[in-house]
Amino acid sequence: MKKICLIIAALFFFSSLSMGKDLLLEEVPDTVGEAQGSKKEEIKPVEKGKVFEERVFGWKGFVLAAGNSSGFYHSGSETRFASLQLNLQMDFKPSPLFYSHLDIQGKTSFSSDPSKNQNPKDVFLTHELYFSSQISFLNFSLGKKRLVIGSGMLVNPLDIFNPQKALPGLPEEREGQYLIGFNFSQLFENQSITAFSADFFYYPGIVKNKQTMLPEAIEKERQGFYSRIGGVFWKCDFSLYGFYKYEAFHYGISFSRYLTDSLEFHIESLFSNQRPVSLKRLFVDENKTLYLNQIIGIRYSFLSKLIVSLDYFYQQGGLTKNEFEADFSFQRKLFSLLILSLNSEEYEKNPFLTLKKHYLIVNLSWQDVSDYFNLNLTSFFSPEDQALLLFPKIDYLANDKSTAGFGVMLISGKKDHQYRNFSFEYQMVFDLTVYF
Amino acid sequence: MKKNLKIFVYLFFFSLFSGIFSSPVTAEDRKASEILEKAINIIAPKIFLAEIEMTYLRSDGSQAKYKMILKHKNYKYSLVNFLEPEREKDRQVLRIEENLWSYMPKTKKIVQVSFDSDFMGGDFSNQDIVRLNLLEDYTPELIKETENQYILDLSPNGKGFSYAKIRFWIRKKDNMPLQAYYFSRNGSPLKKLIYKDLKDFDGFTRPSVYEMTNLAENTKTYMIFVSFKKLETLPETTFYKENMGKY
């Protein structure tokens, strides 16, 4: 017994001694400036001309060739659609007080079957043209600008002014809005609040395409304002919102925080006294209930390169089972016509993506799968009719200036599930982007 | 029997508390902090602006290159603005104290990101680039003093740092940083950083090349400081989250 005790004690003793011992305790080669033992250090001056200068004028652009091929349910036919676009962005910052930005796009498209909803046309759009002035903590903006609101990755209930059309992985297509806006920002030096900011934006609702002859009522709906107050409190990025849009007030909250090194948690909620705009014209609700649109989700980084986000989207104003089934095929046509009449531009969030009340949304983004490839996988799942939209896409980073992507959008679900409204069974998408 | 038990008890308590008795005294702590502070002032003065080229080797031997501007203030605020390659141009990373955001110009979205994540796919992590005051996050201990170098061990002040320990080699005569090893929580070395090529940046002398080796994957990433300006001030507006996207 005593021998065992002695052995254990000796093991403790020697292990405690060896814990402090380390092989990495020797001098390392002097790599910064001189060989070991040399008397005088020779310091190389920086080459002339390699000194940073603030950029006054900057520009960039890209050419995007995109296409898709869709297989249709009803006819069994296939349709091919292709587009070619040129985007150009310019920045001008003559002083720290003044900044201006231009983002223009020219696009031409072709379709193998123009009778389908992807009509070929040539467009020229000014996505953004604004200037902003920064005087101390006050920022003033005027012009046409894209405004991205919310902390959710795939669906943003708060993003009601100029919502994103495309799914992640597809070329971003977000229409800018004419606006006049102010922002007050202040950084604080104490530990509890690190930043504080408030926005006020007014959208005068200028209709840029007069040819569409929007009815007066709809034109009114384009006007609105938005205000926000928020900041970073105890590592929480928190904002409160007030909107006026579609002739109604809406209120919102957004919150995000890293709970651990790799796990982010976010909530984004919109309270509105009307149903989502894409549905309110179809089903008039006399109850005037306060509807909640909410995303609750997490984002987790695996091995620094793989990010998985999981969101639950609750849309209180979504279609009920009865509403969906009530001769929906007819309603759908009516609905499509309505959307089309409202939506003179091709840039509008796809309204069919979230028609119902409950969705589980998953996104997987894997950067540098094998040096040259990025993988993105998006899925929308509605438990009510087990409708599933699955969209894997892989991007090939050919070089510093060009990328090529290929993806397939697949849909499935119960008979007459909601994603049949896409009309297609599958869609293959291709894109090639050259930056300059 | 009693004698043996006594020996056992002595040995046991000696081994148990040997770590405590061998801990450095407060004066040593102060010295270690001073050494590290001087080294940090060389790597990252309080306010600076730097133009950096980052290169890493892909598995096929080709190089991935990024060019960026790093603006830094008071060890609390950092902004990285990408200039190259073209497909990443105007991407930004902003740190305000304990928060980190990334701005993606393609989607115009600003999302919170983790300090732990890889910095643009290389061997540096986000925190290696934007959390520059090691004294803020780690407690230094002078574990060895050789003829020419100090060797410090840096232990995290709290939870939430991706490195469980950093071992730092600093040149004695001018407090120039030479090398650092980054350790995981299980004690194995993760990465090795070598500071290289001292250069004179407009009167401010500091290493111009960082070589980071991922010891597990045997990959290397280089950071070359093309220019470096120690500044008196930088406007606060530079670090407003609302200004992300404007270069």
Image (tube, coloured by chain):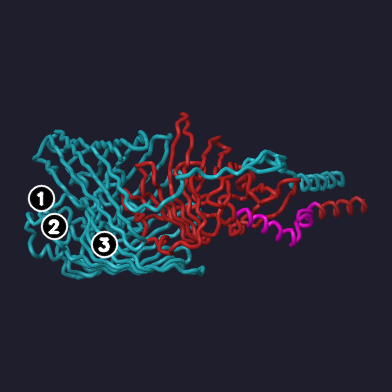
Chain colours: A cyan, B red
Magenta stretch: includes residue B218:
no
Mark 1 or mark 3, which is nearer the start of the sequence? 3
Between residue B171 and residue A214, name the one nearer to us: B171
Residue receiving disc 3: A316
Residues under labels 2 and 3: Cα distance?
33 Å
Instruction: Give the residue displayed 29% in from the left and 62% down from the top.
Output: A132
- Chain of the residue displaying label 2: A
Assign the magenta stretch its main secondary structure: helix
Q: What is the tally of numbered marks visible in this picture? A: 3
Q: Position of residue A22 (x, y in %)?
A: 72, 43
Q: Position of residue B161 (x, y in %)?
A: 56, 53
The single residue placed furthest to the top in the displayed view is: B60
In magenta, the rendered stretch is B15-40
Circle 1 Cα neighbour tier, 10 Å, few/some/many (<14 / 14–19 / ≥20):
few
Q: Position of residue B6 (x, y in %)?
A: 89, 54
Point out the image quarter for the C terminus of chain B: bottom left
Q: Position of residue B189 (x, y in %)?
A: 62, 42
Residues under labels 3 and 1: Cα distance?
23 Å
